[in-house]
Image (spheres, grey):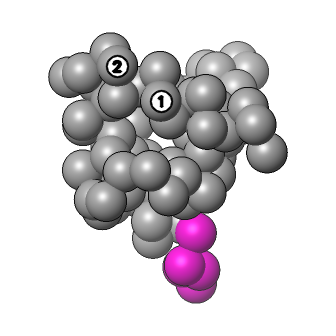
Amino acid sequence: IENSQHHVLDVTFTEDASRIRKGNGPEITSVFRRLALNILQRDTTLKASLRGKRKLCGWDETAFEKLIAGFSQL
């Protein structure tokens, strides 16, 4: 059964296609994905979808800095 968080992680981060399977890697990457998802969902400065925010922050360092600065003030 897929819950809404798993669906969002799969769509935004293509989690099901991940090839990380050995040791603690899957658990560690899952924690970082959920952290990133939480930060993206709480952000109100960027008006875009979660995937769009993620791509924008990957392309534009100032957008990434704004996202992190906004999260650290909570």
Would you name the residue on which mark 2 appears? 62
CA gap between label 1 and label 2 equals: 6 Å
Q: In this view, does 1 lie above or below 30?
A: below
Q: Is residue 30 visible?
A: no
Q: With 71 as the anchor, is 36 left or right in this view?
A: left
Classify 10 Å Cα crowding around label 1: few (below 14), some (14-19), many (20 and above): some
Residue at image point 24% right, 35% down: 56
The amino acid marked with disc number 2 is Thr
Q: With 67 as the anchor, is 64 left or right in this view?
A: left
Q: How many marks?
A: 2
Using the image as rendered, state which of residue 6 and residue 59 is in the foreground. 59
Q: With 67 as the anchor, is 27 left or right in this view?
A: right
Residue at image point 73% right, 21% down: 24
Asked if residue 20 is among those painted magenta in the image, a careful observer would answer no
x%, y% of residue 73?
A: 76, 37
x%, y% of residue 74?
A: 79, 45
Considering the whole magenta stretch, tell me its main secondary structure.
loop
Q: Which residue lies furthest to the right in this view?
A: 74
x%, y% of residue 12?
A: 35, 53
Q: In this view, does 10 lie above or below 39?
A: below
x%, y% of residue 26?
A: 62, 31
Q: Can residue 74 be seen in this view?
A: yes
Q: Which residue lies furthest to the left in this view?
A: 59
Residue at image point 32% right, 15% down: 61
- Quadrant of the image for the N terminus? bottom right
SS type, badge 1: helix
- What is the magenta range? 1-5
Contact check, label 1 and label 2, Cβ < 8 Å = yes
Would you name the residue on which mark 1 appears? 66
The amino acid marked with disc number 1 is Lys
> Quadrant of residue 17 in the image?
top left
Using the image as rendered, state which of residue 50 and residue 61 is in the foreground. 61
